[in-house]
Image: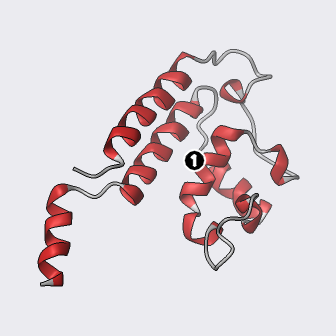
């Protein structure tokens, strides 16, 4: 079993449960947002959306030798971020969708099944 399994599954469940519990009727919160995204600064993007963007644009954000640096999100143009978010956002309650997509991408990127690990070992021999 992959070492990430003990971390990824509970984290994914927690993230989805958190957003499922958040109110959708308060337009002052991200989960209640009903409109069009027009982020003007990377630092103004809410954490839950930043996590999604870092997974969606992972190769773009973490390419090169300086993968230890902070603010990876700045590797993505704001126009590109706004376009993607407006494309997938379905109005209030969409943070649960964003959390689910984040979970799926992160698990896909980090978790290798036992079968895949065995195939890699066979390929080495």
* Residue 118 against residue 84 in the figure, above or below: below
Residue sitting nearer the eye, 123 or 77 = 123
| Residue at the spot 54% in from the left edge and 40% down from the top edge | 98
Give the tally of numbered discs.
1
- Label 1: state its secondary structure: helix
Image x and y of residue 88, in percent: 57, 47
Residue at the far bottom in the pictured view: 125
- Please name whichever residue, 29 or 4, is drawn nearer the observer in this view of the structure: 4
Decide: is 20 above or below 90: above
- For mark 1, does the 10 Å Cα neighbourhood hold few (<14), some (14 to 19), or many (20 or more) residues? few
Name the side, left or right, on which 73 lies relative to 106: right
Q: What residue is rendered at 54% in x and 16% in y?
A: 21
Residue 58 located left or right of residue 85: left
- 87 over 94 or under it: above or below: below
Residue at 64% from the left image edge and 38% from the top image edge: 48
Question: In the rendered image, which quarter contains the C terminus?
Answer: bottom left
Q: Position of residue 15 (x, y in %)?
A: 50, 31
Does residue 17 appear left or right of residue 44 in this picture?
A: left
Q: Horizontal and vertical percent for residue 23?
A: 63, 15
Disc 1: which residue:
88
The image quarter containing residue 79 is bottom right
């Amino acid at each position: 079993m992959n070492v990430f399994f003990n971390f990824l599954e509970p984290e994914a469940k927690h993230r989805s449960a958190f957003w499922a519990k958040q109110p959708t009727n308060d337009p002052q919160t991200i989960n209640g947002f009903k409109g069009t995204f027009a982020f003007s600064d990377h630092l103004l993007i809410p954490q839950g959306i930043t996590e999604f963007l870092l997974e969606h644009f992972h190769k773009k954000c973490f390419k090169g030798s300086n993968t230890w640096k902070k603010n990876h999100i700045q590797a993505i143009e704001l126009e590109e971020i706004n376009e993607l978010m407006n494309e997938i956002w379905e109005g209030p309650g969409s943070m649960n969708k964003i959390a689910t997509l984040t979970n799926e991408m992160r698990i896909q990127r980090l978790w290798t099944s036992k079968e895949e690990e065995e195939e890699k070992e066979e390929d080495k021999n």
